[in-house]
Image: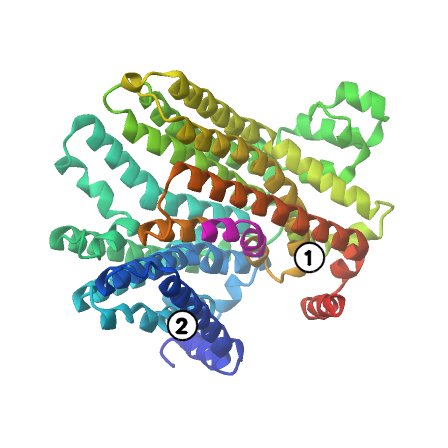
Amino acid sequence: MVFLPIVARELRIWSRRKTTYWQRSLLSAGALVIWFFLLVASRSGMRPAERAQMLFAALGVLCFAFCLLSGVFITADAVSEEKREGTIGLLFLTDLKGYDVIIGKLAATSLHAIYGLLAVLPLLALPLLMGGVSKAEFLRVTLALLTTLFFSLSLGMVISTFSREARQAMACTVLLLLLVTAIFPTIAAFAVWASRRSSHWDTFYWFSPAYLFAQGFDANFSRQNFNRSFFLLFALALGCFGLASAYLPSLWQEKGLGNSGRNGKSRGARSPWRFGTEEWRARRKNLLRVGPWESFIQTPLGSPLARMNPFYWLATRDRLPQVLAWGAVGGVFCIWLGFFAGTFTRDRDEFCQAFSFFSAYFMHQVLKFLVACEACRRISDDRHSGALELLLVSPLRVEQILEGQRAALRDIFRGPILLVLTANFCQFLRILGWAFASPRSGGMDHEIVAFFILTVIGGAVMLGLDFYALSWIGMSRALLSKRYHWAVLGTIGRLVAVPWLSAFLVYLFLMSDVLRGEPGEMTGLLVLWLGAGAVVDLILAVRARRRLEAQFRQLAALGPAKRFSLQEAEHR
C-alpha cells in the first residue's frame, strides 16, 4: 500500500489547479505592495537599521495574524463536513488509518496556507539586507510563524473531529485560540500586576503563540522562555493531531444527518436546553395555527412576529446561537468589568485604563464575529441541504424570508448588544469623571478626553451600522459562497478587515514617526476612520440588499459555478 495515499492524491490534484499557483503569487504580490508602501511612507530621517526593524515587525505581525486564523477558516470544518454528509465510514472500509485521513485532510485544506506563508518569507528576509535584523532573529520569527500555523491547523482539525456543525467548530476554535493567545497572558499580566511577582506566572505565557512570536525578536528574546514556549506549543499541536487520529476511526458508529441517535431519541429530547422541552416546542408549533392577536398573548417568545413569519420561527428554534453569544460576550464583559473596577484605584489605574479600553474594543469584535457567523449559517445550511429550494416553492415570499432572518438576528443578539452598549456607557461616564477631576486625582487633558469620548460614542454608532451591514452581507455571501466558512470569511473580510488594516497602518506610522501622535491629530484620524467605516457599511449593505431582493431565487437555485457566472454578468 502507498504511504499516505490521500496526501499523494491531494498533491496530484492541487498540482493541476491554477489556483495553487496564482493564489500564492497574489499573496506575495500583496505583501510586496505593503512592504514598499511602508518603506516609502516611513520617515526619511530614520536610520536604515530602524527602518528595517519597522518593516520586519510590520510584515511579521501580518504573517502571524494569517497563521493564527488559518485553523478557524481552513481546518475547523474539514472533518465535521464529512460527518454531516455521513461519508466518514466509507473511508474506513479500506485499509486507511486514522492518521492517513487526518494528514490527507490537512494536506487538502491547508496547502494554500502553507504555500502562502512560504511565498511571503523571502519578503520577510529583505530587512536582513538593510541591517538591523540578525539572521538568528529572522530564523526565530520564521520558526514561531511555522509553529503557530501548525498549532492553529492542528487545533482546528481536532475541534472539527469532535464537532458536527461548522458554526460550533469555528466558534470553539476561535474560543480556544483566544484562550491560549490572549486570555492566558492577560491572566498572567493581571496576576503580576496584583502580586508584583512574575516567576509563578510565566507558564501562562508559554501557552501563547503571540508570546512565542514576540520572543523571537532580539529586543524580547530569552532563550529559556523561547525554547519552553516553542516545545510546549509544538507538543500541543502534536497532541491535537494524535487525538484527532485516534478518535476518527470511531466516528463511523455515529449517525449521519438523521434525527435520532443510538438510543432512538430525538435530538430535541436529548437537548432540552437547546431546543426546549416537548411542551415548549408544542407551544411554538401552535403559534403557526392561531391568529396574530392570539399569538401575541400566548407566545412564549413574547413577539407576534413568530406568528406571522415562519422563517423567523425556524431561525429562532435553536437556542444555541443565543447561548454562544451570551457566553462569549459575557465572558469578555466579566474581564472588562475587572479592569474597569481597577480604574478607580489611585496607584495602579493606568494599567487598568489601557486594558479596559482594549477589552471593550475586543468585546465589540467578538460580537461582530458572532453576528457574521449567524447571519450566514441559516441560509447556507438550508441551501446545502436543499431546504431553501423547497421553501421557495411555498407561499412564503422572499421579503418574508429576509425579514424573518433579520428579525431572528435582532432577537438573538439583542441582549449581548445591550451588554456591550452598557460597557460603552460605563466607559463614557468614567471618561467624564477623568475630565472633571483635578490633575492630582488622575484628571486628563481636555483634548485627550475628547478623543476618548469620540471613541466610545463612535464605537457605539458603528456597532449598530456594522450589525445592519453584517445581516445583509452575511445573507448575500451565504448564497454566493460554496462553503459556510468561506461565506463567514467573505463577510468579515469585506466589513471588518479594512478598519483593522487601517488601524494597523496608523500604528505603524506612529512607530515610524510619520505621525506625532498628538491628541488633535489622532482625533482627526479617528473621525476619518469612523466616517469611512460608516460609508463602507452603508454602501455594502445597500448593494447586498438590492442583490438579495432582485436575485434571491436565481442564486438559491443555481450551483456555485453558475452563481459566479451570474455575478460576473451582473458586474459587466
* Residue sticking out furthest to the front: 45
Q: Which residue is mark 2?
A: 115
**Image spot of residue 301 (x, y percent):** 69, 25
Q: Nearer the viewer, residue 301 or 333?
A: 333
Whether residues under marks 2 and 1 lie with C-beta atoms below 8 angstroms apart, the answer is no
Please state the total of marks drawn on the protein image.
Answer: 2
Q: Residue at x 45, y 50 (%)?
A: 162
Q: Which residue is mark 1?
A: 479
Residue 149 shows up from this direction: yes
Q: Is residue 265 left or right of residue 570?
A: left
Disc 2 or 1, which lies upstream in sequence? 2
Which quadrant, please, contains the N terminus?
bottom left
Q: Amino acid at mark 2?
A: Tyr
Which SS type dominates the magenta stretch? helix
Q: Residue at x 86, y 26 (%)?
A: 291
Q: Residue at x 24, y 70 (%)?
A: 130
**Image spot of residue 82 (x, y percent):** 53, 60
Q: Tell me the element at label 2.
A: helix
Was residue 58 drawn as part of the magenta stretch in this picture?
no
Q: Tell me the element at label 1.
A: helix
- Callout 1: few (<14), some (14-19), or many (20+) C-alpha neighbours within 10 Å? many
Q: Nearer the viewer, residue 367 or 28?
A: 28
- Callout 2: few (<14), some (14-19), or many (20+) C-alpha neighbours within 10 Å? some
Q: Residue at x 65, y 31 (%)?
A: 411
Task: Determine whether 217 is above or below 268 in the image.
Answer: below
Question: Which of the numbered marks, if any, corresponds to residue 133?
Answer: none
Q: Amino acid at mark 1?
A: Leu
Q: Which residues are magenta?
A: 489-502
Task: Determine whether 391 is above or below 92 in the image.
Answer: above
